[in-house]
Image (cartoon, rainbow, N blue to C red):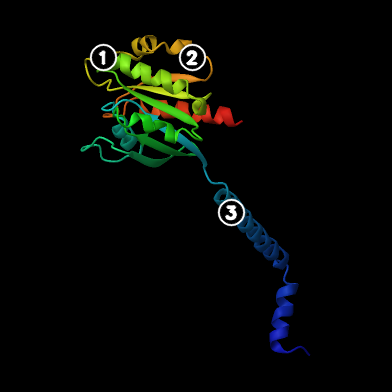
Amino acid sequence: MLPSWKARIFCVLRHPLFPLVTLTASRRQNHKMGLLSILRKLKSTPDQEVRILLLGLDNGGKTTLLKQLASEDITHITPTQGFNIKSVQSQGFKLNVWDIGGQRKIRPYWRNYFENTDVLIYVIDSADRKRFEETGQELAELLDEEKLSGVPVLVFANKQDLLTAAPASEIAEGLNLHTIRDRVWQIQSCSALTGEGVQDGMNWVCKSVNAKRK
């Protein structure tokens, strides 16, 4: 005769529902392992990093734009004397944005940051028409730089919230952007202050990087 505890186990094994219980437990275990596998895969595929160079003349609104991208307070902005860098997550990319000061004395140092740039963002004060020629010259020189050859360019026509701002189409014509043949480019109206147009521009950046890396 079987001991009482062995008899109980024998009865369970003989029970007609035992195979169903076993199958259900097995499925739960497989489902759990499947979820763990997916989670591990997601964890092991981090966002692709993108190096973005943010340039333009002083007082163009670069730092305000950068803070807007990072969802930071833009109440108090001081001119950038060196550089700022912030990382922004967008559409599966980790955008490392380098904001370099735009004062005349700092511009010669821009070239120190050209290496490995994936996208150039050039910011223009659309309301400061007196400096259009100056900003156009700076942009033209950047496009001639060997280390920036073929790098996609996004021109932000900033400060569109001001009544005196020139439309993006007028700026594009004045800068002869239509003559650019060695890279993809885009001009985007925006206001770093209100955030209008900023995300549209960054969507173009992500799309351009994605197309280039395919």
Q: Residue at x 57, y 47 (%)?
A: 45
The circle drawn on residue 180 is 2
Q: Which three-letter amino acid code belongs to the residue tagged 1?
A: Arg
Residue at the spot x=35%, y=29% of the render? 107
Cβ–Cβ under 8 Å for marks 2 and 1: no
User: Residues under labels 3 and 2: Cα distance?
Assistant: 44 Å
Left or right: residue 201 compared with residue 20: left
Report x, y in % for residue 191. Answer: 29, 25
Give the answer, above or below, for where 48 lies relative to 161: below
Secondary element at tag 1: helix
Query: What residue type is disc 3 on?
Result: Arg
Q: Mark 3 against mark 1, which lies toward the viewer?
A: 1
Indicate which disc, 3 or 2, sits on the residue closer to the N terminus: 3
Q: Nearer the viewer, residue 46 or 98?
A: 98
- The residue singled out by tag 3 in the image is 40
Residue that carries the numbered disc 1 in the rendered image: 129
The percent position of residue 40, horizontal first and vertical second, equals 58, 53
| Picture coordinates of residue 25, whole percent (x, y) | 65, 63
| Mark with earlier residue (2, 1) | 1
Task: Nearest to the eye among marks 3 and 2: give it.
Answer: 2
Residue found at the far right of this picture: 1
